[in-house]
Amino acid sequence: MQSLRVALGDRTYPIHVGPGLLDSDALFAPHLGATAAVVTNERVAPFYLERLVRTLARAGARVVPIIVADGEQHKDWRTLDQVLGALLAARCDRSVTVVALGGGV
């Protein structure tokens, strides 16, 4: 794994790149609240969602998967409404950790 530090003062964060990251519960654990919502699209979900859900659960989070349609035409207010509706339905509050799974999400 290689890491890059994005220096933004009190909002500094790391970016990790490398194989096996989706399986590293120790990597996710320090960043998780009690609930983690994973927002992904219908193209990426079949390949990686189950794996990430297992990892986040091992790290101690209740996981809420949210799958949205794929494509630029779906990056709109309706899709945002879908995501927010799913978060509300799962009774997520402001402490939820939101994980975007996939570059286009």
Image (spheres, helix red, strand yellow):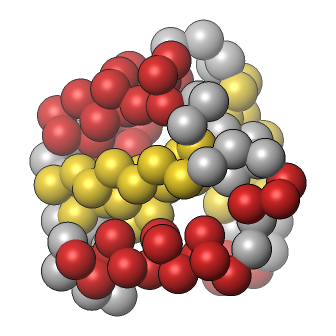
**Residue 80, percent across and down?**
59, 76
Considering the image in quadrants, where does the N terminus appear? top right
Q: Residue at x 44, y 80 (%)?
A: 84
Does residue 31 appear anywhere in the picture?
A: no
Q: Is residue 45 left or right of residue 7?
A: left
Which image quarter: residue 90? bottom left
Q: Nearer the viewer, residue 55 or 44?
A: 44
**Residue 25, percent across and down?**
31, 32
Q: Nearer the viewer, residue 34 or 14?
A: 34
Which image quarter: residue 17? top right
Give the total number of marks visible in the rendering: 0
Q: Is residue 20 left or right of residue 43?
A: left
**Residue 8, percent across and down?**
79, 74
Does residue 88 appear anywhere in the picture?
A: yes
State whether residue 5 is above or below residue 42. Answer: below
Q: Is residue 67 left or right of residue 73?
A: left
Identify the residue at the far bottom of this view. 94
Identify the residue at the far top of this view. 19
Q: Residue at x 40, y 54 (%)?
A: 66
State whether residue 36 is above or below residue 47. Answer: below
Q: Residue at x 73, y 60 (%)?
A: 74
Q: Nearer the viewer, residue 8 or 70?
A: 70
**Residue 94, percent across and down?**
34, 88
Q: Residue at x 66, y 60 (%)?
A: 13
State whether residue 43 is above or below residue 64. Answer: above
Q: Is residue 86 left or right of residue 77?
A: left
